[in-house]
Image: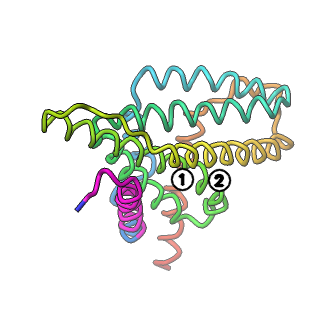
């Protein structure tokens, strides 16, 4: 049974909702039931318009920070983006309807299974561990609060908001560490970039190109196996 008053129990269920779809995705990746490009298109529909606009607005300042070499400000922007939009809105606020963050967790697990099936992408595992680890802590917080509110309303009891602050601290620490790691990676990569035109960089286009490359890599592996 799900002891929704115990945050650790809720967190273990969240992990199951993440890693089981990831395992299934890795196992069925050989059949290529759905392309990475198609998954990117579907995933865009899971972001509300307001969150998307704020995210795009922050991207402009991220690019400006990279161009100016303002790495501390870039780290702050990445952290605030992940904390406020990725964790607080998508996982905790949406947690009022607790099925939503669980669904997003299942989708992320399936998508990450497809991505990590490609050996070239596994170099980002450390960044993924901290950044998405923070989202998993946020999901546990949101689901716990959402179930508590739902059960209280059903039973006609007074709604009590019991925030698991230890998980809040873990969420913040993981997301900040992830933001710092991402900043370091961007700083290293910027040495081989033409920063004069970085303001024209299109994050959405880059995401689509990466998904397309993953699909092409899969076709290449299949071709080599058939030879």
* Label 2 secondary element: helix
Between discs 1 and 2, the one toward the N terminus: 2
Q: Which residues are magenta?
A: 2-26
At label 1, counting other C-alpha atoms closer than 10 Å, the crowd grade (few under 14, some 14-19, many 20 or more) is some
Relative image position of residue 123 (x, y in whole percent): 67, 61
Relative image position of residue 161 (x, y in whole percent): 35, 34
At label 2, counting other C-alpha atoms closer than 10 Å, the crowd grade (few under 14, some 14-19, many 20 or more) is some
Q: Which mark is residue 115?
A: none
Give the quadrant of the N terminus: bottom left
Question: In front: mark 1 or mark 2?
Answer: 1
Relative image position of residue 41 (x, y in whole percent): 41, 39
Quarter occupied by residue 57 = top right
Q: For this rendering, which residue is in front, 28 or 187?
A: 187
Kindly identify which residue carries mark 2: 127
Q: Which residue sits at x=29%, y=51%?
A: 4
**Compared to 92, does 226 lie above or below?**
below
Q: Which residue sits at x=59%, y=31%?
A: 81
Q: Overall secondary structure of the magenta stretch?
A: helix
Relative image position of residue 188 (x, y in whole percent): 82, 47
Q: Any magenta on residue 117?
A: no
Q: Which mark is residue 133?
A: 1
**Compared to 159, does 40 lie above or below?**
below
* Label 1 secondary element: helix
**Compared to 118, does 14 lie above or below?**
above
């Amino acid at each position: 049974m799900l002891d929704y008053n115990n945050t650790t129990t809720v967190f273990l269920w969240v992990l199951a909702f993440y890693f089981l779809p990831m395992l299934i995705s890795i196992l069925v990746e050989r059949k290529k039931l759905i392309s990475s490009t198609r998954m990117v298109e579907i995933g865009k529909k899971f972001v509300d318009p307001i969150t998307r606009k704020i995210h795009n607005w922050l991207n402009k300042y991220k690019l400006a920070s990279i161009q100016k070499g303002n790495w501390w400000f870039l780290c702050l922007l990445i952290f605030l983006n992940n904390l406020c939009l990725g964790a607080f809105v998508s996982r905790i606020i949406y947690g009022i309807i607790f099925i939503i963050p669980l669904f997003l967790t299942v989708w992320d697990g399936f998508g990450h299974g497809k991505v990590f099936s490609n050996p070239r992408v596994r170099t980002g595992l450390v960044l993924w561990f901290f950044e998405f680890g923070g989202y998993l802590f946020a999901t546990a917080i949101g689901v716990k609060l959402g179930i508590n509110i739902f059960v209280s309303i059903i039973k006609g009891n007074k709604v009590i908001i019991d925030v698991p602050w230890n998980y809040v601290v873990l969420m913040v620490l993981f997301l900040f560490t992830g933001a710092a790691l991402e900043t370091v990676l961007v700083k290293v990569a910027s040495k081989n970039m033409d920063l004069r035109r970085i303001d024209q960089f299109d994050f959405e286009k880059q995401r689509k190109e990466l998904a397309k490359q993953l699909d092409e890599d899969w076709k290449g592996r299949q071709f080599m196996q058939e030879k």
